[in-house]
Image (cartoon, grey):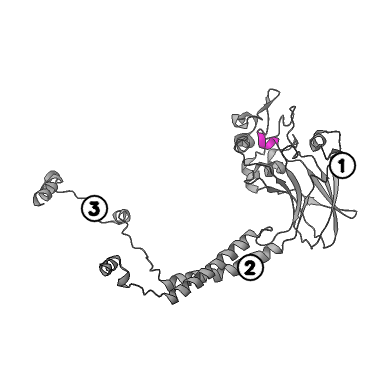
Amino acid sequence: MDEASTSASGGSAGRGGRSFRPARSGVFYRFTQQDLPAWKPAMTPGCVITIFLIVGITFVPIGLVCLQASNSVAEIVHRYDIDCVPNAYRGNKQAYIKDSSISKKCIQKVQVRYRMKAPIYVYYELDNFYQNHRRYVKSRSDKQLRRGLEHTESSCSPIERSNGLPIVPCGLIAWSLFNDTYGFTRGSKEIMVDRKNISWRSDREHKFGKDVYPFNFQNGSLIGGGKLDPNVPLSNQEDLIVWMRTAALPQFRKLYGVIEEDIQADETITMHITNNYNTYTFGGKKSLVLTTSTWLGGKNDFLGYAYMITGSLSIFLSILFALIHVKVPRPHGDAAYVSWSRKNSNS
């Protein structure tokens, strides 16, 4: 051992007879050796029971508040894709939606059950529409949306060119633009729907160019969805901007507009719908949604139930652990529970 240590120390000696040894101090060395100061709590039964009890007592009231906020949202969801098909075409809905000679205008009436206080948000809801499909999501050109025609990319395939000319905006997402329209009346009075500022401000200012205009859009033999005004820049085409922000789930809502006047309970609202968008080919559903909001957002019971279930489970576990601790107490630091002590006692 002495010889080995002598040779090792001699081998590490450099010029001038000085030895170079790795630093055994400093923050980096202590960090790599996991020797930094740390708080290591002793999780005693009483500590565990207290933590679970505090979590439960905190989470249950939060869940009740969230549920109350969600239940205070007034919401109307009206599915219209079936009701807006004439009786003669109920057995062949695709023939109806593809025939441009048939009027697509539809009138539906709904009765408001609860008072809806402005602002009232108007959404269209699609079901069984997979905007998260890999090929669909990739079929776009962000450079073209910002800079214009000369930046058309192959990523837009298969909607890249038409009649030998590039398409702006290109890609499947823009090509399938939702194009149903809605209007509302209360008796003989029209309810105005504000269509401005329905998209994200960051999208309008940074993702869609102010000098980029639609070009050669929906001019092919196969029309996917709505058309765009070629005289309006993409940064002002807010329906397109909202649609281009793809949804993660097959059932989603997108903002159509905002109503800035109250609707009283028991009033009858007439909805004037133009049923243009084809969801019948893939078995999709279309609904019109009118909803208010609270400090927590729209109607969503999940958060409230999640808090309540977690809190209730924590309270249950705290009671269970307390009963076990009372019935079978285990003092903290009892040497009888050390592994070598058990071995000696067994022998």
**Numbered circle sitting on residue 64:** 2
Q: Amino acid at mark 3?
A: Ala
Q: Is residue 84 above or below residue 135?
A: below
Q: Using the image as rendered, state which of residue 43 and residue 294 is in the foreground.
A: 43
Foreground: 204 or 291? 291
* C-alpha distance separating marks 3 and 2: 57 Å
Q: Residue at x 62, y 62 (%)?
A: 305
The CA distance from mark 2 to mark 1 is 46 Å
Magenta region includes residue 10: no
Q: Tell which circle, 3 or 2, labels the residue nearer the N-terminal end.
A: 3
Magenta-drawn segment: 168-177
The residue where tag 3 is placed is 23
Counting residues from the N terminus, which is met first, the one under dot 3 or under dot 1? 3
- Secondary element under disc 1, as helix, strand or loop, is helix
Q: Say what amino acid the circle numbered 1 marks.
A: Asn
The image shows residue 123 at horizontal and vertical percentages of 73, 50
Question: Residue under circle 1?
Answer: 87
Question: In the image, residue 342 lies at what x, y percent?
Answer: 29, 68
Quick one: 93 or 215, which is closer to the camera? 93
Dominant secondary-structure state across the stretch colored magenta: loop
Cα–Cα gap, marks 3 and 1 = 87 Å
